[in-house]
Image (cartoon, grey):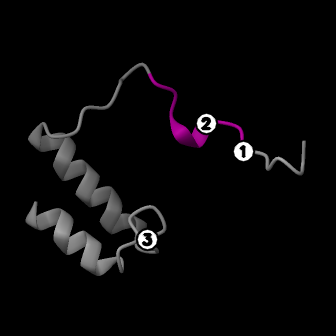
Amino acid sequence: MADLVRLRDHCGGRFHGCQDRAEVDAHLRRRVDSGLLHLFPEAAPLHGLAPLQSVEAR
């Protein structure tokens, strides 16, 4: 929990909008390694998905 609080403070409370993506990635890696976060190995990698379109662009 202390790691999450530290990340919150470091990112000004903006986890998803944090400018320090390396720190967010490191936090997520620590959660996966500790067994607190389980990712689906069969899921498509996010970087391989097509970008989202806004409603106005459709």
Residue 56 in the image: x percent, y percent?
Answer: 89, 51
Identity, as a three-letter code, of the amino acid under mark 1: Leu
Counting residues from the N terminus, which is met first, the one under dot 1 or under dot 3? 3
Q: Secondary structure beneath disc 3? A: loop
Residue 28 in the image: x percent, y percent?
Answer: 27, 51
Point out the stretch of residues depicted in magenta: 43-51
The answer to if 46 sits in the magenta stretch is yes
Identity, as a three-letter code, of the amino acid under mark 2: Gly
Residue depth check, mark 3 versus mark 2: number of the one nearer the observer: 3
Side of 41 relative to 37 (left or right): right
Residue sitting nearer the eye, 55 or 34: 55
Side of 17 relative to 56 (left or right): left
Looking at the rendering, which quadrant does residue 50 occupy? top right
Residue linked to disc 1? 52
Neighbour tally class for label 2: few under 14, some 14-19, many 20 plus, Cα within 10 Å: few
Residue 17 in the image: x percent, y percent?
Answer: 49, 68
Looking at the rendering, which quadrant does residue 33 occupy? top left
Residue sitting nearer the eye, 47 or 51: 51
Identity, as a three-letter code, of the amino acid under mark 3: Cys
Residue linked to disc 2? 48
Tell me the CA gap for discs 1 and 2.
12 Å
Residue 20 in the image: x percent, y percent?
Answer: 40, 73
In the displayed structure, 29 sits above or below 50; it is below
The majority secondary structure of the magenta stretch comes to: loop
Tell me the CA gap for discs 1 and 3.
20 Å
Q: Can you tell which mark lies on residue 5?
A: none
Residue linked to disc 3? 18
Tell me the CA gap for discs 3 and 2.
21 Å
As drawn, which residue projects farthest toward the top?
42
